[in-house]
Amino acid sequence: MKFSPKIFNSHPKTDGDFFLGMKRILGFKPRHLSIYKKAFLHRSVNKRDDDGNPMNYERLEFLGDAMLGTIISKHLYNQVPEGDEGYLTKMRSKIVSRKHLNELGKDLKLLEYVESRIPKSHFGENIHGNVFEALVGAIYLDRGYRFCEKFIQKRVIEPYVDIEQLEGKVISYKSLVIEWCQKQKKPFHYEVYEDTGNDVLKHFAVKLTIGERTLAKARATSKKKAEEKASKRAYFALQDRMVDH
């Protein structure tokens, strides 16, 4: 599908408006506005810098991902002195999960600032989290570690990080099911099978067999999602037995 060269965005028309928007989101004044503008620049705009390098949010997203992981790791290290490496890693994964980052991006309405040649309705769900990470990367470049930590403390840790609540949050039903099967020495198998669904988007149908019994079936737009969905159904079907063990 081809799109016209029109820029699809509700990006503030003036630097002053953009500055005020960023100040509201960040909680402090940005120094170099151009860095933040790049954090909202989609690759479809096809902009390049003076040296011919592509300009979009993806490199800032890479940097922001690293900063987010570092600051969350430091917080968990300080808050849970009894936690071992495995525990800390699992807790960090729950906080910086793609689903959680997407929720953060939505809460801050970051999509309103994205400059793109693609209509917003065509974006996948993950753009919310991608832009959030890019924003974190921009903060680090503009104001350094301390301001980056301040932002994450205010926007991520204080409103969302509850250690006790996170300990009970399941991030992968598939991992739980596989771990239980291995402990119980039960053979298990995920299998993609023929599906006659009439969906416009391609769907994958997966069935999960434990022992000789097909315990759950599920359909989703990717094999990975279908496996997770089937695992969740199997988990609840086996919940009493899994808790006992």
Image (cartoon, rainbow, N blue to C red):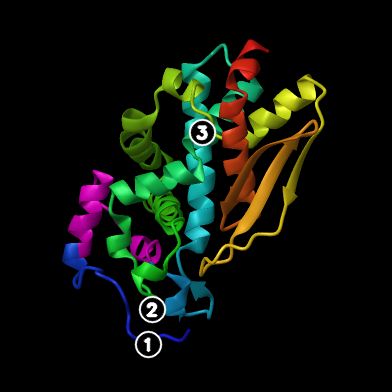
Label 2: few (<14), some or many (≥20) within 10 Å?
some
- The vertical placement of 39 against 4, above or below, is above
Would you say the residues marked 3 and 2 are in contact, meaning their CB atoms lie under 8 Å apart?
A: no
Q: Nearer the viewer, residue 174 or 5?
A: 174
Report which quarter residue 204 is drawn in: bottom right
Earlier in the chain: of badge 1 and badge 2, it is 1
Check disc 2 and report the residue beneath it.
117
Cα separation between marks 1 and 2 = 6 Å
Q: Nearer the viewer, residue 96 or 244?
A: 244
- The vertical placement of 10 against 209, above or below, is below
For the residue labelled by badge 1, is the local secondary structure a helix, a strand or a loop? loop
Q: Which mark is residue 70?
A: none
Q: Is residue 33 magenta?
A: yes
Task: Label the magenta part by its dominant secondary structure.
Answer: helix
Report the span colored magenta. 18-40
In the image: residue 95, left or right of residue 194: left
State whether residue 231 appears in this view.
Answer: yes
Earlier in the chain: of badge 1 and badge 3, it is 1
- The vertical placement of 119 against 154, above or below, is below
State the image coordinates of residue 57 (x, y, percent, origin top left). Answer: 45, 63
Residue at 78% across / 20% down in the picture? 184
Check disc 1 and report the residue beneath it.
5
Check disc 3 and report the residue beneath it.
94
Would you say the residues marked 1 and 2 are in contact, meaning their CB atoms lie under 8 Å apart?
A: yes
Q: Amino acid at mark 2?
A: Arg
Cα separation between marks 1 and 3 = 39 Å
